[in-house]
Image (cartoon, coloured by chain):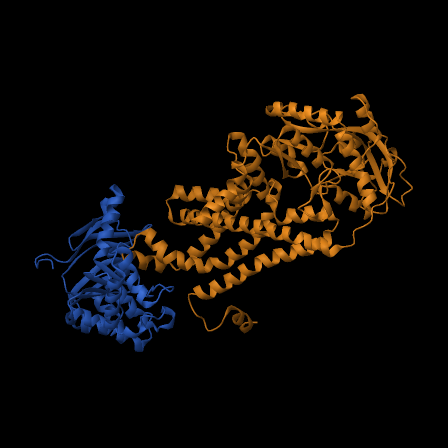
Chain colours: A blue, B orange
Amino acid sequence: MSDCSKPLISISNLCKDYGENRILKHVSCQIESGDLVSVIGPSGCGKSTLLRCLNCLEVLDAGEITIDDVCLRAVDHDKNEDCFWQRAHELRQNVGMVFQSFNLFPHKTLLDNVTLAQIVVKHEKQEKAKALAMSLLEKVGLGNFSGRYPWSLSGGEKQRAAIARALAMKPKVMLYDEPTSSLDPEMVEEVLQVMRDLDVEGMTQIIVTHEMRFAKDASDYIIYMENGEIVEISDEDEIFINPQDDRTRRFLKRYM
Amino acid sequence: MKTFYFIILLLFGPVLSADESVLHWAADAESGAPNVFYEDGNLSKLVGFEKDIMDHIAKHLGRRAEFHQNDWDSLISGLQRGLYDVVINGFSPEEGKESSIIFSDPYYACGLSLIVRADTNKIKSILDCNEAVVGVLRSSKAESTLMSSLKNVKVIGYPNEYCAISDLKDKRVDAILLDGQVAAYYTKKLSGLKIIDEVDEIKYSIVSTSNNSKLMAAINDAIEHMKRDGALDALVSKWDICNTFYVQLRETSGKSKMNPPCLNSESSQRNNQEIIKYLQAFPFFMKAACVTLMISILAMCVAIVLGLCLAIMRVYMPKWISFLAISTIEFLRGIPLLIQLFFVFYGLPCIGITLPPLVAGILTLGMNYAAYEAENFRAGMVAVPYGQMEAARALGMNQWQSLRHVILPQAFTFVLPPLTNDFIAILKDSSLVSLITIVELTKTYMLIASNSFNFFGMGAIVAIIYFLIGLPFAQLAKLAEKHLKLEKRAYSSRKIGRRYR
């Protein structure tokens, strides 16, 4: 545990360009350990890009990101690329990612999906990795499915398996990129429940979502983004009842 | 490990066995009667006039004679490349323009005989061949003689005697001009042909390279010895190939007690025990099939490993490496395999890289196919959704680990069908290595068929063998595909086809 005065995640002046387009414009925020944060906003506002930057799936063009004392600076990427990627690798060790389209490995069973990175990256022993994988699969309610292949699962089951896979690396932060967007409505709840359970256990989680109800009920606070900028960070009740910014109000009006 | 050593021994064996006690000699036994040929197409019975001469010479030198098969066109290239010590295949000194080539004293002389169909009346002598179509052996003395003496003759060059003669019988050419004793052999063996004219004189010499001049002196000594003790005369009469030119040759070099016999004296009885010929051929076909299979499998291994490297370089490496990979791929697949083969086998020795035939063949085939496999693998890797790579990277795997554990296993399932395709293609393309002295299935067929005058039956057998070799691999790939399939779809590909018809 990092000490209380220091946030687990701090983002400062983060910029990201796609060619001429600046997707993220000097984004800064801090997230404490144990928080469950929802990031909402219209499509194309850069919320997914922000999440992907946190896991170095996108290379930041300016600014810096610190997660659990590992600091990643955009200037390092230009100056010393090897050093940058070494840092990025360290940073990823603390960050788990869940994708909209699950991205389970289709050629492996659920058990192998969950053990693969443990064995390859952390050089865990087969038995130890299996034991952890089984306990995680049970935790997400897939204990009986360990020998199944991804193609035989429903969307909700796949996403829960993907969460178990990310958890197996013992991350300090979990990032969710629209985890329920490609699910049938009746399967959304089972995935959200897993996230609520993790919150109770004290996991730090950042969720990019369109599930306003979940954002409202479960989040510690909500980040509203528009046009590559953070417009408003506020308490989950506050933002829905009494948004401070006009843009937030307009966006929420369409949803609520 | 043992198999590994075995393969190494097999590949480099020809090089290791280059010791002084063996006299390596080469000829083209493809329809080489009566000089060097396989009796009735039986590949264990190498016989012939020149074969006997080489046995005599080797005995005289106190060495063991070892035969190397090579195509007529490539005999001299192989000699210069050091594949064997000497070539004996009816070469006459005029044919060698290269200064590095030396010739022995002549051991035989003959004329060029003009053969026509028995029912032809139009052509009575070589002079009637103006305006006619005449077949000859490619780059032979007959070809140059014909070209220089007749203006309007249309000359067709054949790779071997049998092809020329069967074309004559099939009326594709009007006449053929062959060395006297060869013409005599075939007109005796095959009915419906006649010899009508004999022109010019050719003297046969053994060929070697100038750095073998000591060996050549010994061979000349042996030939002289054979002439003196009558062994040469005995061989000439054994093979029934005496003629006026030979008698003249012997008279100028000393005594001769021989009289030229009249040609077409008797026709040998045809061996109608075809079944026995097939049975005899069978073990040789099997052995050749193993050679073909071994070459194909090893070449495919080279292609897969090299192709995979090229594909990874092209897709995942920095720009300049990617460019290097693209250039290599385009270069390798843009040049005919045959040219690559000749370049590697006969060209590279010029810069000091001399590879044994099998190694050269396997490497060239493998390299050529690597270009195709690289593109197959690239297609496979690109077909794996990008999210897979992201998921692997997000889990903390580095690029190589992601490739190894996530991308390649999935890409392989996409690549398997075209890979199987290419294996069957390589199985057939491996026949090209017969051009660099390797006797594999196609070459065996040519040797057996041209010596037993049976292109039809033997051809059918070879076709079936090729088909049978490829079949299990196709089945194996089918099984693997089923096993590796990423998604058990409700409909198999065939059912999908039916569904949308």
Number of marks in picture: 0
In this image, B39 relative to B479: left or right? Answer: right
Q: Residue at x 49, y 51 (%)?
A: B373
Residue A251 picture location, percent across and down? 25, 68
Quarter residue A170 falls in: bottom left
Q: Quadrant of the C terminus of chain B?
A: bottom right
Quarter residue A223 falls in: bottom left
Front residue of A153/A31: it is A153
Residue B84 picture location, percent across and down? 60, 33
Asked whether residue B142 appears in the rendered view, the answer is no
Residue at the front extreme, as displayed: B229
Front residue of B149/B220: it is B220
Asked whether residue B166 appears in the rendered view, the answer is yes
Q: Is residue B100 above or below residue A116?
A: above
Q: Is residue B80 above or below residue B470?
A: above
Front residue of A66/B407: it is B407
Residue A14 picture location, percent across and down? 22, 52
Residue A232 picture location, percent across and down? 18, 63
In this image, B460 relative to B197: left or right? Answer: left
In this image, B16 relative to A53: left or right? Answer: right
In this image, B176 relative to B492: left or right? Answer: right
Quarter residue B91 falls in: top right
Q: Is residue A227 above or below residue B175?
A: below
Q: Is residue B213 above or below residue A19?
A: above
Residue at the right extreme, as displayed: B121
